[in-house]
Amino acid sequence: MTVSADKVKVLYLDDEQNNLQAFKAVFRREYEVFLALTPEEAYQHLNSNTIEVVVSDQRMPIQSGTDFFNDLVSTHPDPIRILLTGFVDIQAVIDAINKGSVYRFLTKPWNENEVRNSIENAKDIFRTRKELESRTKELQKAYDELDQFVYSASHDLRSPLTSLKGIMNLARMEGENQGQYMEMIEQVVDKMDQYVLNIINYYRGNRLEIVEELVDLTELFEDLIQEIKFHPDANGVEFNLDLQTDNEILSDRLKLHLIFRNLIQNAVKYQRPDVENKNIQIKSYYKDDKICFEITDNGAGIEDSMKLKLFDMFKRSHHPKSGMGLGLFIVHQCVNKMGGEIYYETSVGKGTSFYVYLPILSPSR
């Protein structure tokens, strides 16, 4: 979660209306101030807004500020809490601090600069904590992915190696007709080569920083089509290129190549053999200050069991031509890295459309 740099949202709870109005009059220009006469009103604001700082009076008829904060810890632990009191109730302050429910204690009548400094410090603490939580989640996600990656990589690399050793032993024992075994060995080596290439692409897409340069879209897609159309699965497939955007855009050439190579390869791989007019449509157009790329095929479509985990690492469909489960994961990682979004529409037996939205503008726009 990235916390907005907008005005700090401050909630002030006090049972005296005059105190509330005075607080808002002083701080309304600097902060987004929410006022509450009762704890119930305070919870309504807390449930509807991302409150960063809560200021509460100590002596109130329904519930003391200390008790309110102690309850708040279990229901809304994130806001930083500041306690105001018109008298020195040492035991209440000690209890509040010991229970971790109060960040700062201020006396009434409050000093404007002292309250302002306390709110600013509390804001910094709140936003730093949120940033730390976000980074922690990112690190945990990266750790989980690495753990899964190492496990799957070791399994998927050892499997073809085991097959390779078995084929070589058969070839040695028979001595003759080794041509068929050479073909089998070549297939296994190709499979391993593709897997290593996927690992390299994973690193390039997920780890390398964005490098902006002018990219010729016509050249990019024509090169990809030329590269893919000689694949056996592409036999009889018609490619249609419709670029409705400026031909040159400012973007990351490598990540665009990774994204669309995987999407077009999949569109080719999952064509239906029973379809005569196999085709893949490649479009680009501007939409809401973003550039949209659309890759549409009339192939097999995506099975229901895959839809919720389509972009997960090593998730493979039951299709006989299913790959290693890295392609769409790499696509998703690249799109996220570029600050974009990816969606898809699919119908089993009719085809799939992928929509990639990227925050890229042509140099002339």
Image (cartoon, rainbow, N blue to C red):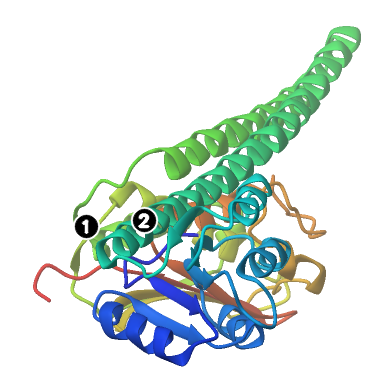
Tell me how many marks there are: 2
SS class, disc 1: strand
Query: For this rendering, which residue is in front, 264 or 84?
Result: 84
Residue designated by label 2: 256
Please tell me which residue is depicted at 33% across the width and 85% down the height of the picture: 22
Determine the image quadrant of residue 321.
bottom right
Q: Is residue 261 visible?
A: no
Determine the image quadrant of residue 60.
bottom right
80 lies above or below 40: above
Please tell me which residue is depicted at 8% across the width and 73% down the height of the picture: 364
Residue designated by label 1: 215
84 lies above or below 226: below
How far across and down, in percent of the image, does residue 183 sit? Answer: 71, 29
| Badge 2: residue crowd in 10 Å (few <14, some 14–19, many ≥20) | some
Left-right relation of 347 to 354 = right
Q: State if disc 1 and disc 2 touch (CB < 8 Å).
A: yes
How far across and down, in percent of the image, does residue 320 sit? Answer: 80, 56
